[in-house]
Image: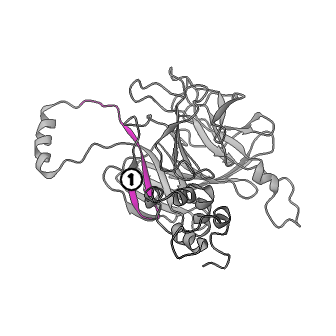
Amino acid sequence: MSKKRAGEEVSKRFQKCHGLIPGLPSELAIECMIRVPYKFQTAMKSVCTSWCNLLSDSSFSRERMRCGKAELLLCLVQPLTPPKPNAVEEGEKKELLQQQPRVSVTPRFGLSVYNATMSTWNRVAFPEQQIPLFCECVAVQASGKVLLIGGWDPVTLQPVKDVYVLELAGEGSGRRWRKGASMKEPRSFFACALVGSTKIYVAGGHDDQKNALRSAEVYDVVRDEWLSLPPMTEGRDECHGFAMGPKIAHLDLDMKGPCSAHLTELGFCVLSGYGTESQGRFRSDGEVYDPATNTWSRVENVWPFHDTSPRGRITGDIRGSSSKLWCFVDSKLQWETEDDSGKWKLDLESVKLPVTGSLVYGGGYGGDAVVMIGGGVMMKTATEESVGKWSSIDDIPFGFSTLPFSHASIYV
């Protein structure tokens, strides 16, 4: 038992549930159940109504996190690889391939999950065999949800406005995918980020004619509805989105904690991207949406790598007096910039990649940074301490080694 009575919040909500485990008080029974690995929770819900109600309550997930028993999942939207041939068939397949010309085939995408706590890889079943190509993956920790947003239809290869929701914790956990409310318009390769605990912002991307979009909208996870936002000043295709905190202009020295305004007034930054007529030439500026004023402001000199997409190259932290970003590139740089309203400040630092000349994908990973390297290697580095000192995590098994398009991490 911890010094603070373990399971206190959960036991208050389920104090009438006697006999969770025969012969044990409810507090101890909850302590035992919190320690069961996540992969067994779906089966546990079928034991009895009390167990199902307990494991489906959001307080159960929060208690797992408080006790340090939650498992970190890294969700990856990535192209699927063909099945590995066995030794008997391998020779026959090589001979067949030599006789037939190579044909370009549209890739199939899936949602892969790496359990960092258990060091296991799995692929999540999807009702339509494959998820939309190039869709955005967003995790909502507060409600235990993973969402797939937009992308391309696997058959028509046209942008879609679909939203798919998978509940990993809470009342709906263990159920199949469900359709969420659709976006106002179809889009792909757009900026997307969770801002706060319940709002997902999207902006930019391109339409079915490959025109860069200026439009933006916000999704309320609780209400399952989309609202349109004012458009950006520029169309931005292949842009990157993230939440950011405002610059603290005045800090009371008597305060013992962070500025309360910083914790509540978060903005949505859309970084770089390119216009319709300048495909592949990434902009150096960005735009920040302020929910408090319902307006956009421009931030200059934020992305100096004109030949490199910011997607899969950035992770960040919104704590402190500004938003700290780490950029995974082959050079060592450090720079700061502010938007033209003076409210938002970006502090950027490049982190030299562990390899050069290889395809990589990087992003956030439970407070640290992680990169996947073409060839099946995953490495991580701490973004607060020992920045740039990479260490190997695990060898990636066959079938999961392709570089992802988008990712999200969540504790369960």
Label tally = 1
The answer to whether any part of residue 241 appears in the image is no
Q: Position of residue 147 (x, y in %)?
A: 54, 42
The amino acid type of the residue labelled 1 equals Asn
As displayed, is residue 245 above or below residue 229?
Answer: below
Residue 277 located left or right of residue 47: right
Badge 1 element: strand
Q: Position of residue 223 (x, y in %)?
A: 66, 38
The stretch of residues the image draws in magenta is 103-122
Residue 289 located left or right of residue 124: right
Residue 258 located left or right of residue 62: right
Foreground pick, 120 / 69: 69
Foreground pick, 299 / 369: 369
Q: Residue at x 48, y 64 (%)?
A: 390
Q: Residue at x 45, y 56 (%)?
A: 46
Q: Position of residue 155 (x, y in %)?
A: 38, 26
For mark 1, what is the residue?
Answer: 122
Q: Residue at x 67, y 52 (%)?
A: 335
Residue 114 counted in the magenta span:
yes
Foreground pick, 29 / 192: 29
The answer to whether any part of residue 111 appears in the image is yes
Which corner quadrant holds the N terminus? bottom right
Q: Position of residue 174 (x, y in %)?
A: 47, 50
Name of the residue lying farthest toward the top: 209
